[in-house]
Image (cartoon, helix red, strand yellow):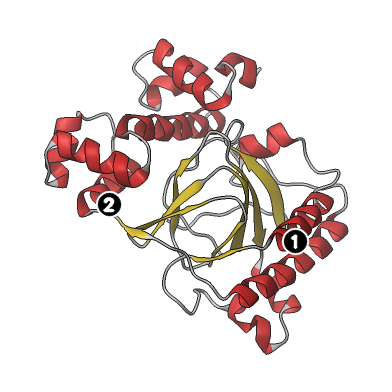
């Protein structure tokens, strides 16, 4: 699924620090015309790409190219990671020499997710650069709530000094790729069992309120086996993954349909009761829904 990141013309991309405790889960498989870079600074993050899962911890530099449909499927509660995206026109202007030619391509020259594990000095330098580029940016709560996609239909990323941000993004892109080239490493991955791949697809694209037994039957395995293999390969129980999807659908429904009340959006997202919704929301964000939304 190709999505628009709603980046205004004056920006060559955007940059923010995603935090599990504040950032709504955007769990559907997607891609976009911008090149995406993640720098993991705490905890672990797991993506699925081309039927394989990739778990990365602190010091990991991850690249998602425009043609690579990727899906965030799990984050540890303490996960923090910078997300930077770069528009094609920035890449075209910045990357003149052969050393950076691959950044102009739709996909990397090797299969799978491109990743490197940074040296401590490299990690410190990139963190400092990203922090400096973000200086004066939108409040962290808002950036995490919007998550780049814009939970609110009229949200647009902004920065008090677009020229400084664009200059920072350009240098960040070139320095990060230099480090990637020096390490020359890919990402260790694990092939997902076909039943897990089917479950992820069904849950993301169709009504996820069906029973576990019904879902397992569609995936060609027993309910007990699907629960076991899903937790082992994804890292969280199937029920927790479902609740994360519901949270994502709640944010989309609540923000894009102004006439909908919180309760209506909650039921439309698949929650069976306010008690269930409140528990899941508080576990994800540390506060109740009315505290966050008011």
Figure check: 194 above or below 117? above
Most foreground residue, 51 or 68 = 51
Figure quadrant of residue 211: top left
Most foreground residue, 186 or 154 = 186
Figure check: 99 above or below 43? below
For disc 1, the marked residue is 121
Q: Quadrant of the C terminus?
A: top right
Q: Quadrant of the N terminus?
A: bottom left
Figure quadrant of residue 223: top left
Residue occupying image coordinates x 87% and y 58%: 164
User: Residue 55: image x %, image y %?
Assistant: 46, 52
Give the mark count: 2
Mark linked to residue 239? none
**Disc 1 and disc 2: Cα gap in Å?**
38 Å
User: Residue 117: image x %, image y %?
Assistant: 59, 62
Q: Is residue 13 visible?
A: yes
CA neighbours of label 1 inside 10 A, class few (<14), some (14 to 19), many (20+): few
User: Residue 10: image x %, image y %?
Assistant: 79, 59
If you read the primary sequence from the N terminus, does the residue marked by circle 1 or circle 2 appear first?
1
Residue occupying image coordinates x 31% and y 34%: 238
User: Residue 209: image x %, image y %?
Assistant: 27, 29
Q: Is residue 177 left or right of residue 244?
A: right
CA neighbours of label 2 inside 10 A, class few (<14), some (14 to 19), many (20+): some
As helix, strand or loop, the secondary structure at mark 2 comes to: helix
Residue occupying image coordinates x 49% and y 59%: 31
As helix, strand or loop, the secondary structure at mark 1 comes to: helix
Q: Is residue 244 left or right of residue 122?
A: left
For disc 2, the marked residue is 197
């Amino acid at each position: 699924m190709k999505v628009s990141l709603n980046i205004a013309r004056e920006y060559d991309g955007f940059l923010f620090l995603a935090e599990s405790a504040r950032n709504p889960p955007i769990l559907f498989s997607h891609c976009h015309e911008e090149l995406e870079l993640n720098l993991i600074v705490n905890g672990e993050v797991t993506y699925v790409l081309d039927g394989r899962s990739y778990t990365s911890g602190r010091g990991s530099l991850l690249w998602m190219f425009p043609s690579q449909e990727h899906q965030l499927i799990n984050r540890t509660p303490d996960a923090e990671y910078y997300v930077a995206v770069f528009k094609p026109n920035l890449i075209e202007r910045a990357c003149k020499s052969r050393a950076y030619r691959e950044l102009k391509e739709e996909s990397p020259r090797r299969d799978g997710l491109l990743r490197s594990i940074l040296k401590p000095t490299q990690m410190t330098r990139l963190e400092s650069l990203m922090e400096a580029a973000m200086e004066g940016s939108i409040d962290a709560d808002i950036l995490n709530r919007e998550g780049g996609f814009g939970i609110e239909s009229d949200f647009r990323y902004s920065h008090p000094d677009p020229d400084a941000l664009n200059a920072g993004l350009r240098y960040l892109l070139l320095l990060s790729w230099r480090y990637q080239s020096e390490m020359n490493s890919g990402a260790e991955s694990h092939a997902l069992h076909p039943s897990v791949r089917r479950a992820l697809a069904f849950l993301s694209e169709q009504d996820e309120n069906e029973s576990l037994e019904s879902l397992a039957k569609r995936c060609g395995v027993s309910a007990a086996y699907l629960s076991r293999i899903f937790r082992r390969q994804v890292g969280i129980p199937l029920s927790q993954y479902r609740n994360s999807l519901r949270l994502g659908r709640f944010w989309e429904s609540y923000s894009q349909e102004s006439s909908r009340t919180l309760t209506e959006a909650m039921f439309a997202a698949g929650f069976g009761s306010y008690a269930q919704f409140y528990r899941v929301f508080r576990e994800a964000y540390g506060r109740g829904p009315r505290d966050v939304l008011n």
